[in-house]
Image: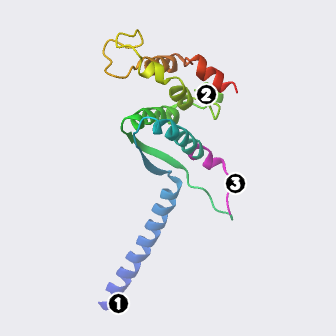
Amino acid sequence: MRLRVFCILLLGSFWLLVISGIAKAESEEQPQRISIAISGGASKGAYEAGLNWGFLKIMRDISKADSVLGGRYRPFEPASFAGASAGGINTLLSGLTWCTLPESEGGLANRIDDNIFRDAWLMPDVNSLLPPKARSPQYLSDDAVLSRRDLVNTARGLLNGTPPRSEEAAAYLSV
């Protein structure tokens, strides 16, 4: 009787090891899912936009990297983006960047000198965000203290595939 119980336990343990090995091999093929939280803070959003762009670029390119010592890189995949205030804008831009086709396949431009993060953060300037006159045409009908016009124009341009650029931003980008 004891021998029979021992054999059953041994056989059961063997199958558990086999099944766990198969499950582990399958899980190593899956990308590592991560969530990204982006803080707010007005002008800090412009800084974080560049950081987010670089982070997403690395996450996409890591699977193309050479292996180290015969190993493999496990690809990363964002599970979610979250943010507040300026971080909320960067959250939308991050999701849009991750979900679009590569530029070579007709997607949005995604180079260090031409990407949606730069377009969204270089377009507005202080004079258009906070016009000097309360009745300025820069304000949209439902704006509060700050004007959203440049941000709305940039979003519309992204939907049309040609984000507008202010003269200052165009001059800065051409340098």
Q: Verify CB contact (< 8 Å) between mark 2 and mark 3.
A: no
Q: Which kind of residue does numbered mark 2 sit on?
A: Ala
Q: Nearer the viewer, residue 134 or 111?
A: 134
| In the rendered image, the vertical position of residue 111 relative to residue 21, given as above or below | above
In percent of width and height, residue 94 lies at 48, 36
> Marks 3 and 1: which is nearer the front?
3
- Tell me how far mark 3 sits from mark 1, CA to CA: 51 Å
> Image check: 6 left or right of 104?
left
| In the rendered image, the vertical position of residue 36 relative to residue 128, given as above or below | below
The span shown in magenta is 59-68
Observer able to see residue 155? no
- Tell me how far mark 2 sits from mark 3, CA to CA: 25 Å
Identify residue for label 1: 3
Q: Residue at x 53, y 54 (%)?
A: 29
Q: Verify CB contact (< 8 Å) between mark 3 and mark 1.
A: no
Instruction: Name the quadrant containing residue 91.
Output: top left
> Image check: 168 left or right of 44?
right
SS label for mark 2: loop
> What is the chief secondary structure element of the magenta stretch?
helix
Identify residue for label 2: 109
> Marks 2 and 3: which is nearer the front?
2
